[in-house]
Amino acid sequence: MQNFPGVGVSPGRVIGTVRQMPKPISEPPAGEQLAPDTTAEEATAALKAASQAVHDELKARAAHASGDGKAVLEATALMAKDTMLIKGAAKLVARGTSAERAIWESGSSVSEMLHNLGGYMAERATDVLDVRARIVAELRGVAAPGIPASENPFVLVADDLAPADTATLDPNKVLALVTSGGGPQSHTAIIARSLGLPAVVAAVGVDHIADGTEVYVDGAAGSVTSEPDGSLREAAEGWAATASLLAEFTGTGATADGHQVPLLANVGGGKDAVAAAKLGAQGVGLFRTEFCFLERDTEPSVEEQAAAYKSVFDAFPGKKVVLRTLDAGADKPLPFLTDSTEPNPALGVRGYRTDFTTPGVLDRQLEAIALAANASEADVWVMAPMISTAEEAARFASMCADAGLQTPGVMVEVPSAALTAEAILREVGFASLGTNDLTQYAMAADRQLGPLANLNTPWQPAVLRLVGLTVEGSRAEGNSKPVGVCGEAAADPALAVVLTGLGVNTLSMTARSLAAVAAVLKTVTLQEAQELAKLALSAPSASEARDRVREKLPVLAELGL
């Protein structure tokens, strides 16, 4: 046996044979020139046609996807027609470089630029390299890189997966997902959680495991073991037997002593909402509205927006639906709203801040939300992303009031919002913690980088303290405002217990995580959850915090979580 330690990002214990991702498209030779019988105009036309074909293929796949997968595919499709990428290649073609070599070099330049910017823009670097390979494949007339076909289920192993690949994983064929790169908040991790696939990232060396090798994957412990022995086989069999206990959510999130912790779903559109309702979600804690803006050169009309919002509201009549206003910018650029030349987009004009530079878009979105809310029976709450000050919170609340929306709130993603939560929550009705961004900003750690995976975890005591400060601010004299969590932290059953102990009122997650979180919550009392929260806060490191809490929750091992 050989063990490959990594970072567990989606629980489960399975044994299967390895299938490695195919080798990437080979690099066109350096200095490759246009063929003697090909003009620069013809090569440029072929390049643009290949770019359009890749865009159309990704867009078609997006039409059959939903949620996180749909968003990833649509964002990657946009990159296939990225002006900087195509113009850079066209300039090289004009100088005599072949179309294949030109797009390769242009892709390298754009990817390097995005990577150096860090934060969200570094996340886009992977998209560029994926798109570059697809365009080269189109120019060569060969199959694009992708997940291997197989008659039998397998464990997929790769250095990292391109966003378009992670978005179309078939959970009926892929038993588990293992990568040697990536981090706990990478595309790979998020999609694995949404599909309910056991997954381990940042497991150095796994990309050298031979095809056909049998491996044991523990998505909770973050380990991969080749040639598993009898004890590991028993562990996998035990997981298969107990996994059925996590198949259904009864529809009520609560601790053992009856303390209510409503479990909500993160959704991106009507399809997601219907699926979440079927899985028992008690409402929606995060409705990502940018999905209806992606792949648009112009702003959708108020009527178009209202129809998209109403499809989500109608899935939860009489229940809470928390809608996040447009979170454009950084990794979600929009031609009509954001500036692609910002030197540091992760710290730039994104989310609520776009109203500073392009006023009117947010007003019209609020108008559309109100229109849809008035035509539905859902209890609609509205929150703005990237709020940093009480002044911004007050202005957003005023905009909501002008639109006729009764319950304004804010996302707590910026450390300053957590530190000044008391003042901010005097201006609005609720707060929701976006732990993905809050962790990244608090720890100054790019969430896509495997080497920083141990920094970029919400188990960091510093991040948990920011959560606690937000709750304290919500309960200060004169305040009594609910605080939820809608980041990936809520989907970790052990961390869900800690968040409950810190005083968080609601937890929102990918719908597939509802049953696991509910199963663990009901094994502890509120007082026990509070004690576990103190234990985590007093730990000297994130790993120690996680280990201390998990040791006190034997149910996690029993359920393979």
Image (spheres, rainbow, N blue to C red):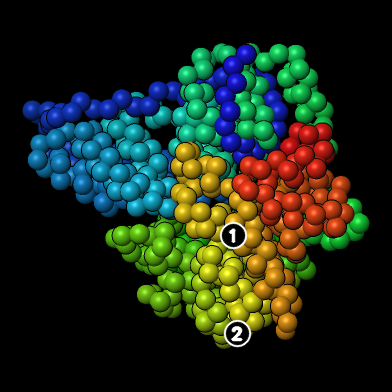
- Name the residue beneath numbered marker 1: 434
Q: Residues within 10 Å of mark 2 (few under 14, many from 20)?
A: some
Residue at 82 percent across and 28 percent down: it is 241
Residue at 73 percent across and 67 percent down: it is 320
- Name the residue beneath numbered marker 2: 401
Residue 367 found in image quarter = bottom right
Any part of residue 280 in sight: no
Residue 311, given in percent of the width and then of the height, sits at 64, 62
Indicate the amino acid at tag 2: Ala
Q: Nearer the viewer, mark 1 or mark 2?
A: 1
Taking the image as shown, residue 47 lies to the left or right of residue 143, namely: left
Residue at 60 percent across and 51 percent down: it is 460
SS of the residue under disc 1? loop
Image quadrant containing the N terminus: top right
The image shows a total of numbered marks equal to 2
Residue 512, given in percent of the width and then of the height, sits at 70, 45
Q: Is residue 275 above or below residue 236?
A: below
Residue 355, given in percent of the width and then of the height, sits at 43, 75
Indicate the amino acid at tag 1: Gly
Taking the image as shown, residue 29 lies to the left or right of residue 120, namely: left
Q: Is residue 467 above or below residue 398?
A: above
Q: Is residue 125 above or below residue 426?
A: above
Residue 21, given in percent of the width and then of the height, sits at 47, 25
Q: Is residue 477 above or below residue 179?
A: below
Image quadrant containing the C terminus: top right
